Image (cartoon, grey):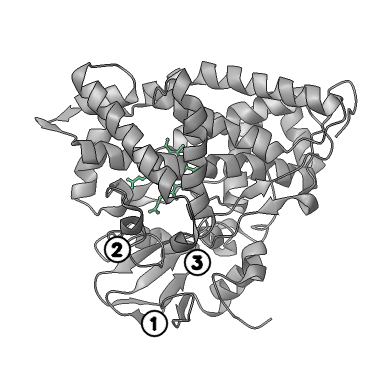
Amino acid sequence: MTLSYDPLDEAFLANPYPTYALLRDQDPVHHHAATDEVPELWALSRFADIWESVRTPGDFSSAQGLTFYPDEIGQLGLPPNLVMLDPPVQTRLRALIGRGFTPKRVEQLEGTIREFVRRQLLSIGERAGEGERVDLHQEFSSTIPTFMLAELFGVAEEDRLRFGPWVHALTAIQNDGFRIGQLDGKGAVAELLTYFTEQIASRRQSPSDDLLGSLVAAELDGERLSDWDILGFCFVVVAGGSDTTASLISHGIALLSERPDQRELLVKDPTLISNALIEFLRLESSVQGLCRTTTRDVTLHDTTIPAGQKVMMLYGSANRDPREFGDSADVLDVRRTIPRHLAFSSGPHFCIGSHLARLQAKIAFEELLALHPHVSVDTAAGERHRSPFVRGWVSLPAGNFSTPDGPAAG
Ligand code: HEM
């Protein structure tokens, strides 16, 4: 197979892994000349190179955006946020946000998320029992983060029907590879911006102890977050925290469908689930790649990337690099020891919501496998979204959706 890397090629997006292997072996600092669709860019594919680069923000900046399209955020009218700032400004902002978005706040969500997951499974199970074909991505995986976000932001009951479609519209933009001009999600983004602006204003008037209230009150050495800082954070959480988590759950279900022996291990010993989640993320990383921009000429493996170039950090490739994970890097092993991985990046932009993502997925698999130990999905009938940046499902019909007493209708 000869090496050809086109980040928008349909066959590549359907299965990027053979191309990643060629890039790692033959051209670890790959140059992609500009085409009509894709501007000039570079691609790093080996674990060690990406690990070092994302931990060196002085050379690889986030401030020019995370896709290879120019000014993607500006086009949407979104406020600048954490993920697109460099240290030391980002470090300070992140510390202030950490005053409001605490581990305790995440832990407090466990009970409500579990209750929600049980309710969802009950209702899907009833419908499957009546012979309906259920879609486990749409009706299970993707409902959990939307619910979690509504809880996290304290969205009032009467606003929840509007909130879901806003989340959906924002994630649809990135799921379509950020080809913003072709999408009609801008209206929804503007509505979400207005909604959050009003909510922040109301917390400024009357303090509350929900996340927005805590962000409004957060203080570090006398400094506080501006409305714009909080808005930026809200957007990165909605855009970066919902579909990524839904994809983790759906990828896990799909991977286990192909390997009933591995599913069996988790059913027999649910304490393995936390480790399995990292293995799912490693094999099918929700975030496949994001860009940085070189601030100076950088030389890697005798190749010099000039200053000012977009460099795609292929996390999805790094996480399958045999140099880091051995010869079985492409094989699912829920018991694998994984000392480090790049599914949540590393360094200054390491995912701030990784605990919350893992908590939701852990609850999802604990409840799903307890109720439906033979669960499987029909991946051939499913549909993936098409983006070089994120990998996940749009639809994933259930195959076998069975109870502990025996198979029920799928
Ligand atoms: C499985 C689910 C998730 C995955 C795979 C994921 C992945 C990532 C990755 C790769 C980054 C680094 C971006 C970069 O390289 O520039 C990141 C950053 C971030 N994530 Fe997540 N994420 C997930 C869930 C969440 C959740 C649930 C939240 C919030 C509740 C969240 C909030 C954030 C924020 C705020 C940042 C920016 C941090 C910074 O720039 O300092 N993520 N995430």
- Rounded to the nearest whole Å, what is the CA distance between mark 1 and mark 3? 14 Å
Instruction: Assign a secondary structure to mark 1.
Output: strand
Q: Which mark is residue 303?
A: 1
Residue 326 % position (x, y): 61, 59
Quarter of the image for the N terminus: give it. Answer: bottom right
Q: Residues within 10 Å of mark 1 (few under 14, many from 20)?
A: few
- Rounded to the nearest whole Å, what is the CA distance between mark 2 and mark 3? 23 Å
Q: Residue at x 76, y 37 (%)?
A: 263
Instruction: Assign a secondary structure to mark 2.
Output: loop
Residue 62 vs residue 208, the one in the foreground: 208
The residue at which mark 3 appears reads as: 46
Q: Which mark is residue 64?
A: 2
Kindly identify the amino acid type of the residue bearing the numbered disc 2: Gln
Residue 80 vs residue 355, the one in the foreground: 80
On screen, 211 above or below 36?
Answer: above
Judged left or right of residue 128, residue 153 is: left
- Rounded to the nearest whole Å, what is the CA distance between mark 1 and mark 2? 22 Å
Quarter of the image for the C terminus: give it. Answer: top right
Kindly identify the amino acid type of the residue bearing the numbered disc 1: Thr
Judged left or right of residue 288, residue 199 is: left
